[in-house]
Amino acid sequence: MAKRAPNLPVKTKEEAVILASIVEKETALPAERPHIASVFVNRLRLGMKLQSDPTIIYGITKGYPLGRRIRQSEIDRPTPFNTYAIAGLPPQPICNPGKDSIAAVLNPADTKDLFFVAGRHRRTRLYRQWRGAGQERRRMAQDRGTENAPPRPAPR
């Protein structure tokens, strides 16, 4: 495993792999992984919840696709994997992360970002910027006729 950058909130190899598994599930684009890792590292440093949808899905399906949107009741339900309900990392990885995700966690981008929007992974420091980016993405999808689901709930 590559050398860990100083002052990371992950202290062990196991924690690095757990966080890398969340980064892996958040984006399929290797170039985005250092930025996504940065958001999660910044949240961990501040004691914020990670609020990652893939952790909820893993808690429900144990690694299989959910095949539908996450329900509000599932977001609210505390499970060991639900990072909307628990602080910190889940007890184990939610997938087998690739080397790009592990490298991203060990050397995240240098940002102060705390939010990103799924699909475009626009990163923002402020909640109001994150909220506006999500609304913009939904408007564009509606214009294309591809948005048929309700908007995702805001983080707490």
Image (spheres, rainbow, N blue to C red):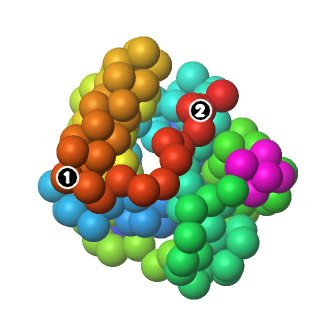
Q: How many marks?
A: 2
In this picture, residue 141 sits left or right of residue 11: left
Give the position of the C terminus as an image quadrant: top right
Label 2: element kind = loop
> In x, y percent, where is residue 56?
65, 60
In this picture, residue 105 sits left or right of residue 69: left
Q: Is residue 21 above or below residue 35?
A: below
> In x, y percent, where is residue 137?
28, 40
Tell me which residue sits at (29%, 37%) in the image.
139
Question: Which residue position holds label 1?
Answer: 144
> In x, y percent, where is residue 49?
63, 36
| Dot label at residue 78 | none
Query: What's the residue type where badge 2 is placed?
Result: Pro
Do we see residue 113 in this rendering? no
- Dominant secondary structure of the magenta stretch? helix
Residue lying farthest to the left in this orientation: 31
> In x, y percent, where is residue 54?
54, 62
In the image, 16 versus 152, the foreground residue is 152
Question: Which residue position holds label 2?
Answer: 155
Q: Is residue 115 above or below residue 121?
A: above
Q: Marks 2 and 1, how far apart in space? A: 26 Å
